[in-house]
Image (cartoon, coloured by chain):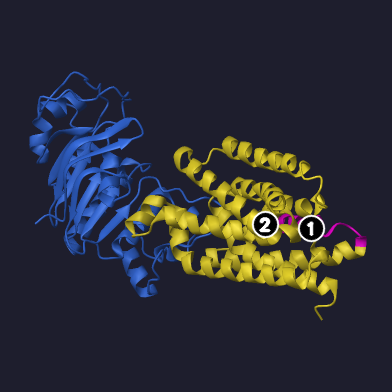
Amino acid sequence: MLDDFLVRALIAGFGIALAAAPLGCLMVWRRMAFFGDATAHAAILGVALALAFDVAILFGVLGTAVAMAMILGSMSERTNGSDTQLAVMSHSALALGLVAVSFLQEVRFDLDTYLFGDILAVDRADLLVVWIGAALVLALIAWRWNPLLTATLNPDLAIASGINARREQLFLTLSLSLVVAVAIKVIGALLIAALLIVPAAAARPLSRTPEGMLVVTTVIAAASVGGGLWASALFDTPSGPTIICVAALAFVITSTLRRLA
Amino acid sequence: MSLIKAENISVHLGHHQALDHVDFSIDRGEIVTVVGPNGSGKTTLLRALLGAVAVQGKITRADGLRIGYVPQALSIGANLPLTVLRFLSLPKRRPKAKALAALDKAGVTGLGNRQMSELSGGQFQRVLLARALLDSPDLLILDEPTTGLDQPGSADFYRQIEVVRRDTGCAVLMVSHELHVVMSASDRVICLNGHVCCHGTPEVVASAPEYRALFGKGTNGALALYRHDHDHHHHGEASDHDHPHEAAE
């Protein structure tokens, strides 16, 4: 069964959708969309560094994503997450990564794979990495779910309940970096943030509780992966962008339904 | 023995000294109100007692002290779907019966299935109060809990606080702008302006020259349109008063 590239693509996509759903919800609730963008963009720099120093790309990406998320985290503590600063960091990280990659002319390397992902080229080893990463992220978020939600509402409220809001932010940051690291080959640095945010945004109008929204987000993310792969085979379009298009379509439908209701 | 006691605490926020050698304590069952101009460190004092900011000095809490906290102007983003009952179960799961009882106690019976974002200002503050009451706190800390409520709404809210104190015996520490309420409902008032300007029973504070310097006289507290006198000194120290004060309310 795993010999079929479409089956492998589906399994990899579902793994990432599963891990992306709770993270995406939390990022939508915490207004961290740009934060996710910047962390994902930093991953390209991680790819370049990993190739230059001959480290596994997974660890290069993980390292830069964590570093970026830490810098952003300390910035948002002081400035309350200024839109402009996050945008500057996000675009600069991407530009720096692209410049760094250009120095690596002796390495055979397809930049497009890391920008847009290549879900159809996923092999068995990749599947293992994706699902181990997804399981880790899910375990971490499940463990910290209630404290994270409380800290999302108000840091002081969390502290009064004995929750260390900064530590919870760290858990979230680590989970995000992990998802970026395992997803970059599958969905690409430019589209990871979209897979995080769009399904969650599409789920919002259909939800009354955080957990309800999480379930709907998971369903929409998985359906986008399935529908996107099917559509990309049918219309011969690039898989990653097609998956995001399906998620965007879901967003349009649920927002319209909400307005009509 | 005090529930919580702060001795000689100072807090720096960046380059700004928000609290300057402040002493504070509250006993079981007391209602203490902190008044002061904007930027006088009222919220910082509460946050210091909660452990949310780094302080110099000593804060002693009674063993096993349970604090219920009602924050100032909590805004729940439109992107977070949250029913009142789910909110009450954060971070700890609560039995539904207990959550409903807390809503009763806070005067908002039957709102359990409403979305937090659909509540009126007064309902929202009472739901926050209900959540704070769930742990049967020894000390209830409220930071300007009636911001955004109209006069009858805030009067109702403070009456609810007195009922809660009467029924549960918890101590109440609050920050308020509404001086007329402060004067009637508090056992003790602390007038803060970076340092403690004066403190004591409402009557003592109302007649203290330091208080009058901050809030003016003869307004009966209802109109706190004041000019802040920057020249008053006490305890023989030159206080850091160079932050601007806008007249409040």
Q: Residue at x 54, y 44 (%)?
A: A72
Q: Between disc 2 and disc 1, whose residue precedes?
A: 2
Q: Which chain is blue?
A: B
Amino acid type shown at disc 2:
Val
Residue B94 screen position, x and y as percent: 38, 71
Disc 2 with disc 1 on a shared chain: yes
- Which chain contains the residue that carries disc 1? A
Query: For the magenta stretch, what is the residue range?
Result: A235-259
Instruction: Look at the image and say whether residue A207 sits in the magenta stretch.
Output: no
Residue B244 vs A166, above or below: the answer is above
Q: Chain of mark 2?
A: A
Q: Looking at this rendering, what residue extends furthest in the bottom direction?
A: A1
- Judged left or right of residue B138, residue A213 is right
Q: Which chain is yellow?
A: A
Locate residue B130: give its quadrant: bottom left
Residue highlighted by disc 1: A240
Q: Nearer the viewer, residue B13 or A58?
A: A58
Mark 2 or 1: in front is 2
Query: In terms of depth relative to the viewer, which is nearer, B88 or B124?
Result: B88
Return the mark for residue A55.
Answer: 2
* Label 1 Cα neighbours within 10 Å, binned few <14 / some 14-19 / many ≥20: many
Does residue A242 appear in this view? yes
On screen, residue B99 above or below B78:
below
Q: Position of residue B98 (x, y in %)?
A: 33, 72
- The CA distance from mark 2 to mark 1 is 26 Å
- Count of marks overlaid on the render: 2
Query: Residue B219: x, y in percent?
Result: 19, 28
The amino acid beneath tag 1 is: Gly
